[in-house]
Amino acid sequence: MEIIKTGIEGLLILEPRIFQDARGYFFESFSQREFEERVGHVHFVQDNESMSTYGVMRGLHFQRPPYTQTKLVRCVSGAVLDVAVDIRQGSPTYGQHVAVELTAENHRQFFIPKGFAHGFAVLSPTAVFQYKCDEFYHPEADAGISILDDSLGIDWRIPKDKAILSDKDTRHGMLADFHSPFTYPVTINTEVQ
């Protein structure tokens, strides 16, 4: 597994080692031992999967304390633009984001620690998206920031007239009106070895 640091502390791109031959390919999508050695100790407790069509935009989601979540996400079919926005008070990169294209072909995974709002846009006709979480889903802690907040400067690569959002996601407020429950720094060892 190769670990690629991004422009924001704590956000990491993971690239697995792919073994290919005439039969197809094989790779280890997750190893707790290697993850702990290379990224840090995270105890994942829930795996989620969604299927979406082109133009679907989900996010920007997070869970409020005490039910905050660290996520490890990947796209197993199709392609998505995956985005994490820093919402940690006091962070030098507060309000900034990292966008990563995750596809079935590149097999990349995106590690998103607590203190980030997360969302994605489907770039292919359909996409199957999977993510591991280190906390169970708690509807009472569910929160978000508007995925269409222009102040974030995110190029979602989807025309606004083609964007498909849930009713819930259309009700999220803008970052300027948001009081974050998260503080800087990240509480996980994200030093790449």
Image (spheres, rainbow, N blue to C red):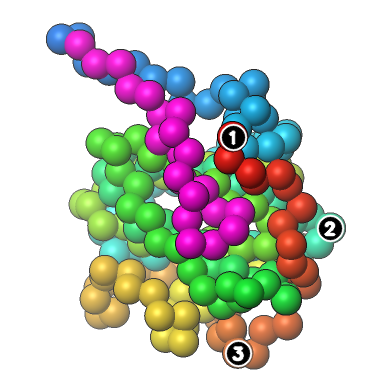
The dot on residue 193 is 1
Residue at 15% x, 10% y is 22
x, y percent for residue 88:
69, 70
Write down the residue under mark 3. Answer: 176
The disc labelled 3 sits on which kind of residue? Ala
- What label sits on residue 50 in the rendered view? none
Left or right placement of residue 147 versus residue 168 in this view = left
Q: Is residue 49 visible?
A: no
In this rendering, the answer to whether 105 lies above or below 91 is: above
Q: Which residue is mark 2?
A: 66
Q: Nearer the viewer, residue 26 or 50?
A: 26
Q: In the image, residue 137 lies at what x, y percent?
A: 70, 50
Q: How many angstroms separate mark 2 from mark 1 (CA)?
A: 30 Å
Query: Badge 3: how crowded within 10 Å, few (<14), some, or many (20+)?
Result: few
Q: From what the image shows, is residue 184 above or below residue 172?
A: above
Which badge, 2 or 1, is on the more N-terminal residue?
A: 2
The part of the image, by quadrant, that contains residue 107 is top left
Q: CA distance from mark 3 to mark 2?
A: 23 Å
Start and end of the magenta stretch? 1-21
Q: Tag 2: residue type? A: Pro
Q: Residue at x 49, y 50 (%)?
A: 5
> Does the magenta segment cover residue 4?
yes
Dot 3 or dot 1, earlier in sequence: 3
**Front residue of 192 and 128:** 192
| Lateral position of residue 2 relative to residue 177, left or right | left
